[in-house]
Amino acid sequence: GEDGPLVAEAYLQPEAGPYPEDKPKMNSVKFTPVQIGAILAGVNEGLTQVVGPPGTGKTDTAVMIVSNIYQNFPGQRVLLVTHSNQALNDIFEKIARLDIHERHLLRLGHDAEKLETEEDFSKWGRVQYMLQKRLDLLEEVGRLARSLGVVADVDYSCESAQHFFLFNVVARWEEYEHKMNTAKDAARVRSEFPFNDFFSTAPESLFKEGGSFEEAMHSAKGAMKHLKDMFIFLEECRAFEILRTYQERAKYLISTQAKIIAMTCTHAALKRHDFVRLGFEFDSLVMEESAQILEVETFIPMLLQAQPINKPSRLKRVVLIGDHNQLPPVIQNMAFQKYSKMDQSLFT
């Protein structure tokens, strides 16, 4: 073209950082071309229906759709709905094993304690987790300040930690990066890295001995990413520091903090007024077992957020997953079942 030749390069994955928790959790499921097509359709905006008999990997496909939305649209929120608690726990456990940070996961309703995970993903469990992580991270900030020779009381609150990050950490990094890009010397990259003392406790060495300049800079950027992630997490803990009561913290968790919220359709129907009053919002709805869910119960989760006047709805995508050949919704009343076709789900 007019701007000169187009250059294509292989994408280099950013360095994760020197600690084991920095390493991304990889997906271990091999998907078929049809499943990949379903995942792509689910990530795109609009309505997607995934149909398949038992054992065809519908749950794994749903998990991967949720994971891809989380990774590609960081600001968006996903509501995950199933008919039974058992199915919800099953899909939620699989999501928790993927590269989705646990601070963004929330499981509402009964049977949250029956999840076979080490962490407590219920409302109160998540609030406790955020408060504990805030203390742990502020302790790390204090250690970082001491390694840089900063004597001020920077690990007092999340706000003081953010000031420290901006004026001490970012300033040192930018100066170092400018110097190294001018010098292009691998030995200097290793010796002059400003946070060497802080990372001396890492289980593995930060830099590889005898590596090239590019490799050394790649490792340095990975270490800086670890620090940035630490302060991003602290910024998210700040609301839990300011809000004083458990109720306020739980409301903030549901309305803002959690990115993937899981519940049954019954819980959604029972608590709809509470969600609307909270100003609960989400961008994607993923519904598992949707052939077993009543037509009205399919619509209720779509209406958990208040519809703003003269504004488009925030809901961008709806993914319905199920099998119309399995059991239909159970209707106890024979009149409703026979004459109003109430046992036919929206999915069918």
Image (tube, rainbow, N blue to C red):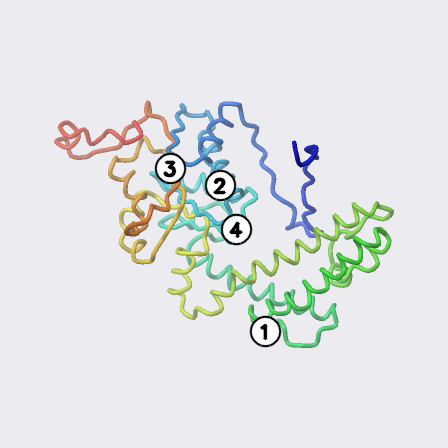
Disc 4 + disc 3, Cβ < 8 Å: no
Please tell me in which quadrant of the rendered image residue 286 appears. top left
Q: Is residue 300 visible?
A: yes
In this view, the mark in front (2 or 1): 2
In space, the residues marked 4 and 2 are separated at their CA atoms by: 16 Å
From the image, tell me which residue sits under label 2: 69
Mark 2 burial class by Cα count in 10 Å: few <14, some 14-19, many 20+: many
- 292 with respect to 118 (left or right): left
Residue neighbourhood size for the residue with mark 1, other residues' Cα within 10 Å, grouped as few (<14), some (14–19), many (≥20): some
Quarter residue 265 falls in: top left
Amino acid type, mark 2: Ile
Q: In the image, 118: left or right of 254?
A: right
Lateral position of residue 295 relative to residue 210, left or right: left
Rendered image: mark on residue 102: 4
Q: Earlier in the sequence, mark 2 or mark 3?
A: 2
Q: If you read the primary sequence from the N terminus, does the residue marked by circle 2 or circle 1 appear first?
A: 2
Amino acid type, mark 4: Glu
Residue 156, label in figure: 1
Above or below, 286 against 221 in this view is above
Which quarter of the rendered picture does the N terminus lie within? Answer: top right
What amino acid does circle 1 point to?
Answer: Tyr
| Three-letter code for the amino acid on which mark 3 is drawn | Val
Which residue position is annotated with label 3?
Answer: 318
Residue at 49 percent of width and 33 percent of height: 60
How far apart marks 3 and 1 lie (CA) works out to 44 Å
Question: Percent x, y for residue 253?
Answer: 43, 58
Q: Earlier in the sequence, mark 4 or mark 2?
A: 2
Q: Position of residue 49 (x, y in %)?
A: 38, 29
CB-based contact (under 8 Å), mark 2 and mark 1 = no
